[in-house]
Structure formats: structure tokens, C-alpha cells
């Protein structure tokens, strides 16, 4: 191992040690199931905002987006536009009402339990179906993150893929298993800050290496005269598909659960400003990193970039001292780990709160349920590790499929549950199933998925089926009406 790699490894080890310390700190503050699954609804706006952003973006922000723009130009930035719009609307429309409604409706601590309580579903089918969807999709989602972690150590330090996978998995499992939701949220906050600073430092300092704005732009246009053209080579369906990524936000359990955990409805406004500010600047930094990378490699033809998706890592190692470059590498690892941990805690809550408690109808103590929640994290992690062990690329492709699956199955139902009093449990159940099936079929037929991202038909079908079935099965319910108006009143009062 070279001296440079040793410095970088020191930074990574210090970062991993900090994550474990935060897990221990959160463990000391976790006393009951609500603490473990939802942090006792005690998160402040900054932690809520950055933890939601960090768990959302994953390695795509530091590797996928810069790599796509480096290779294809600004036409690849439409996904970033769609995500920003979707995230803003999610904070504006969903966050305040979901925070109030989950408190009013039997103090719900998971999305499936909220839907059951909100719609007074006595059959438990809605809760079980939504819990199963979360469990299946997130197990594969977690495995894709573990694959990314293994590949990170392989490409950065030459470590065996399986050794890297075990290191990342062990640290994430440890702080998630013991510290629960608080550990996940606090570590996500630190990881969000690390990602944010890294995405600003790399392009800003890199700009000095490439001669400033004018010279950088000139070098880029020499490489590709249409690089700055956001519509060159794009089709209408392609732009719609990219923008449609924003629809996924309304149904992502690991993101919207943050809205349920914030300390009050009033704080959602501050959290929205922090979260969207973080997101815009981070996306800008990712795009700027790609631009600086194009200019740098044009100006230095003797240096080559093997993989466009490593442009952020490569520039960080070129620009900074190895110790600082190690922090840049830690930012990539942070992006991967923050998403894994968020998905693990939501999967654990689905398994225990929405499946085990719904089926077993046990009256055990909170201490027992917290123990089961920790065991659920361990079991799901081990299954995900087994799936990730062969290092198959196909697992990583499930990320976009899972995003569409959650957006198509849950998105319309979450929105309707917050704004439409006549939504019924039958409507929600059939809409959820229809959306998930549509995404499943569309996403696996190459001719269809190449034409249009599967979240678009999935979202539309779910919305139509939910609306029609709800109108057919609606019956006045005084309890539902009271909770609906109480939730609306709470938002108005706290605002």
C-alpha cells in the first residue's frame, strides 16, 4: 500500500469510528419501540433535512450524476431537475400533513400502520400488503448498497471485494442495530454534511487548476460543442422519464418517515428550506465536478480517466493532500452507508411493527419489540449480504426499479390519504397492488421501459384505480372525518 493510500485509509478508519460512536450514543438514548423506530419524534429541522437528503441521494449523487454528465453533457441533468422539483413538493405538500396525521391517527410510527389507522382497515390486509412490498423491495435495495460498498474498497484501495463488503456491512449493521432510528438520523446528518462539503470543495478548487470559468468553458466546448445544450439528443419521452423521477419521492418510505419523526409541524418549514438548499447546492456541485473534470482531462491529455463515474474520486485525489482526499472518499462511502442504514431501519419496522405485530397480535413489552427490531435488522442484513456476495451488476440495476416501485405503489396513496377524505382501504389496497404490478411488468419489458420510465404508468394506474375503487366503496365514517379535520387543524395551528 502506498503512502497516499495509507493517508486515505486513516481518514476512512476515523470516519467509520465516528459512525460507531454515534451508534453507541444513540443506543444510550433508545428506551422504547417509538425511540427505536422513530427517534421519539424528537428530530430538529437540520437533522431531519440532511438525514432525508443523505438517505435519498446515495452514491448516485457523487458518482452516477457526475459520471453521466461527464460522458453525455448537460442533457443528462434532467433527472436532477425532476428530483429537485419532486423533493420540494414532497416537503411542501406531504411533510406537514404527514407529521400531523400520523400523530392524530393513533400515533402511527410506520407508513403501513399509518395507512391502516388512517383508513380504519380492520382486515389488516392493507398493512400486511404494504409491509411485504417494503420488505421485498428494500432487501434488494440494501444489497445493492452493499455491492457498492464492496466495489468502493476494491477500486479505492485494491482490497478484495468481499472484504470491503464485510467492512461496510459490519459498521452499518452495528450502528443501525444498536442505535436504531436516532443513530441512522444522526449519522445521516454527518454524512450529509460530508457529502455537501466535498461536492463544493472539489469543483471550486478544481476550477483554479483548469484556469477559471472562461478557460474551463472553452476546454469543454472543444471536447463537445453541444455539451451545454440541455436538449441536444433528448426526446420528449426521455425528458418526461427523467423528470418523472421526482414522482418517486411521495412514496419512498425511508424518506417520508423523516417527516413523521420531526419534532413539530412548525419545524417542517425550516427543514424544507435547509433540505432543498442542501439538495440544490449538492446537485450543482455534482454537475460542476463533471464540468471541471471534462476540462481538466482535456487540458492534461497524458492523464486518463478509466471510468466516468469515478471523476469525483479521481479529481479529489489529484487536487488534495491524501488525508483530505481520504475525506473525499469518505463522502462517497457516506452516501452509500446513509442509504443502507435508512433502508434497514424501515425494513426492520415493516417486519416487526407491520407484519409480526399484525399477524401475531402479541402483547409483549416494548423492550421485547426493540429486541425483535434489532434481530430484524440483523436478519435482513444477512439476506442482503448473501444477495450481494456474487457481485452481480444486475442487483445494482434494481435501484431505479425499486424507486419506481415505491413511487408507483405508495405515492398516489400517500397524497390522497392526506388530501382526500373519501379515500377507502379497498381503494388504497387495489391501487397499491395495481401500481406495483404495472411497474413490475413495464420495468421488465425492455421495449416499454426504453420508451418510458416505469414510474409514469405505475403512478397513473395506481391513482386511477385508487380513485375509482374508493368512490365505489366509500361510506361515511365519523372517526375518519374527525381525524382528517383534526390533522388539517393541527397544521393550520402550528403554522
Image (tube, grey):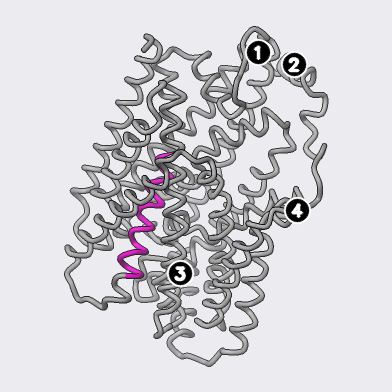
On screen, residue 141 versus residue 474, left or right, reads: left
The residue at which mark 3 appears reads as 130
**Nearer mark to the viewer, of 3 and 1:** 3
The residue at which mark 4 appears reads as 451
Task: Give yes or no for contact between labels 2 and 1 (Cβ–Cβ under 8 Å).
Answer: yes
**Residue 426 rendering spot, x and y as whole percentages:** 52, 83
> CA–CA distance between discs 4 and 3?
28 Å
Given the current orientation, which residue lies at the most extreme bottom position?
Answer: 475
Measured along the vertical axis of the image, is residue 447 above or below residue 294? Answer: below
The residue at which mark 1 appears reads as 210
On screen, residue 57 versus residue 300, left or right, reads: left
Magenta segment includes 346: yes
Corner quadrant of residue 70: top right
The residue at which mark 2 appears reads as 219
Measured along the vertical axis of the image, is residue 311 above or below residue 321? Answer: below
Residue at the image point whose x is 69% and y is 29% from the top = 71
Amino acid at each position: 500500500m502506498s503512502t497516499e493510500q495509507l493517508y486515505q485509509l486513516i481518514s476512512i478508519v476515523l470516519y467509520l469510528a465516528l459512525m460507531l460512536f454515534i451508534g453507541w450514543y444513540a443506543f444510550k438514548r433508545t428506551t422504547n419501540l417509538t425511540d427505536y423506530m422513530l427517534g421519539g419524534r424528537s428530530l430538529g429541522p437540520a437533522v431531519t433535512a440532511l438525514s432525508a437528503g443523505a438517505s435519498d441521494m446515495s452514491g448516485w449523487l457523487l458518482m452516477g450524476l457526475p459520471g453521466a454528465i461527464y460522458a453525455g453533457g448537460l442533457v443528462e441533468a434532467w433527472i436532477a431537475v425532476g428530483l429537485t422539483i419532486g423533493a420540494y413538493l414532497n416537503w411542501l405538500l406531504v411533510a406537514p400533513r404527514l407529521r400531523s396525521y400520523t400523530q392524530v391517527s393513533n400515533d402511527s410510527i410506520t407508513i403501513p400502520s399509518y395507512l391502516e389507522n388512517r383508513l380504519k382497515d380492520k382486515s389488516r390486509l392493507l398493512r400486511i400488503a404494504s409491509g411485504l412490498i417494503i420488505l421485498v423491495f428494500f432487501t434488494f435495495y440494501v444489497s445493492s448498497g452493499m455491492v457498492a460498498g464492496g466495489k468502493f474498497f476494491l477500486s479505492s484501495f485494491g482490497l478484495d471485494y468481499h472484504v470491503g463488503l464485510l467492512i461496510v456491512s459490519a459498521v452499518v449493521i452495528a450502528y443501525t442495530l444498536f442505535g436504531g432510528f436516532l443513530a441512522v438520523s444522526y449519522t445521516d446528518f454527518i454524512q450529509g454534511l460530508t457529502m455537501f462539503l466535498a461536492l463544493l470543495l472539489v469543483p471550486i478548487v478544481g476550477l483554479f487548476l483548469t484556469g477559471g470559468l472562461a478557460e474551463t468553458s472553452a476546454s469543454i466546448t472543444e471536447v463537445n460543442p453541444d455539451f451545454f445544450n440541455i436538449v441536444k439528443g433528448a426526446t420528449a419521452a426521455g425528458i418526461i422519464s427523467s423528470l418523472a423521477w421526482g414522482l418517486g419521492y411521495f412514496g419512498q418510505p425511508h424518506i417520508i418517515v423523516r417527516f413523521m419523526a420531526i419534532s413539530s409541524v412548525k419545524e417542517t418549514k425550516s427543514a424544507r428550506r435547509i433540505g432543498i438548499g442542501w439538495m440544490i447546492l449538492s446537485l450543482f456541485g455534482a454537475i460542476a465536478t463533471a464540468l471541471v473534470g471534462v476540462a481538466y482531462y482535456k487540458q492534461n491529455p497524458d492523464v486518463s480517466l478509466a471510468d466516468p463515474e469515478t471523476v469525483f474520486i479521481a479529481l479529489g485525489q489529484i487536487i488534495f493532500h491524501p488525508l483530505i482526499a481520504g475525506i473525499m472518499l469518505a463522502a462517497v462511502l457516506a452516501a452509500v452507508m446513509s442509504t443502507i442504514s435508512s433502508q434497514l431501519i424501515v425494513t426492520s419496522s415493516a417486519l416487526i411493527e407491520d407484519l409480526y405485530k399484525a399477524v401475531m397480535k402479541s402483547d409483549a413489552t416494548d423492550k421485547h419489540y426493540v429486541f425483535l427490531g434489532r434481530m430484524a435488522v440483523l436478519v435482513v442484513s444477512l439476506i442482503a449480504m448473501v444477495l450481494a456476495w456474487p457481485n452481480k451488476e444486475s442487483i445494482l440495476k434494481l435501484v431505479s426499479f425499486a424507486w419506481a416501485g415505491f413511487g408507483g405503489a405508495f405515492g398516489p396513496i400517500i397524497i390522497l390519504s392526506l388530501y382526500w377524505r373519501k379515500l377507502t382501504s379497498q381503494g388504497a389496497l387495489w391501487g397499491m397492488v395495481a401500481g406495483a404490478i404495472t411497474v413490475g411488468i413495464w420495468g421488465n419489458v425492455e421495449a416499454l421501459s426504453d420508451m418510458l420510465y416505469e414510474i409514469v404508468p405505475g403512478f397513473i394506474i395506481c391513482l386511477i384505480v385508487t380513485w375509482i375503487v374508493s368512490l365505489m366503496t366509500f361510506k361515511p365514517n365519523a372517526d375518519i372525518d374527525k381525524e382528517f379535520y383534526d390533522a388539517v387543524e393541527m397544521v393550520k395551528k402550528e403554522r
